[in-house]
Image (spheres, rainbow, N blue to C red):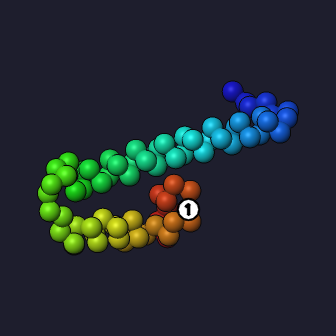
Amino acid sequence: MTIQITTHRDVLRHTVRRVAVAVGLAIVMTATITLLHLGTNPAALVRVDDVIIMSLWPRAMGCDFSCPGCTQPR
């Protein structure tokens, strides 16, 4: 189904919809990866190396954060 854009309002509506989907998916994926990697116990102690590995893992996998979805290796 193609989107029919005829007014400035249609452009804004389309853009807001895409941004809302992207932000929603980013929140869900961040929460999922964090829970899978660090666990669900809020009182647990988290080792520093766990946090470092989790934050450096995308970069180590070859993602330079410029590709769409950060899925293509460099």
Q: Is residue 74 above or below residue 33?
A: below
Left or right placement of residue 10 versus residue 45 in this view:
right
Whether 12 is drawn above or below 35: the answer is above
> In the image, residue 20 lies at what x, y percent?
57, 41
Which quarter of the figure has residue 37? bottom left
- Residue at 35% over, 71% down: 56
Horizontally, residue 48 falls left or right of residue 67, namely: left
Estimate the x, y position of residue 13 in percent, counting from the top left: 71, 36
Name the residue located 63 percent from the left edge and 37 percent from the top edge: 17
Q: Quadrant of the N terminus?
A: top right
Q: Quadrant of residue 2?
A: top right
Q: Dot 1: what SS?
A: loop
Question: Hey, which residue is sitting farthest top in the picture?
Answer: 1
Q: Dot 1, how many residues are within 10 Å of its Cα: few (below 14), some (14-19), or many (20+)?
A: few
Residue found at x 56% / y 62%: 67
Residue 16, position in %: x, y? 65, 41
Q: What is the number of callouts on the image?
A: 1
Q: Position of residue 51 (x, y in %)?
A: 27, 67
Residue at left 15%, top 54%? 43
Q: Nearer the viewer, residue 39 or 67?
A: 39
Give the labeled residue for mark 1. Answer: 67
Identity, as a three-letter code, of the amino acid under mark 1: Cys
Above or below 18: residue 72:
below
Q: Nearer the viewer, residue 4 or 61?
A: 4
Q: In the rendered view, does 15 fall on the left or right side of 31?
A: right
Residue ranking furthest to the left: 44
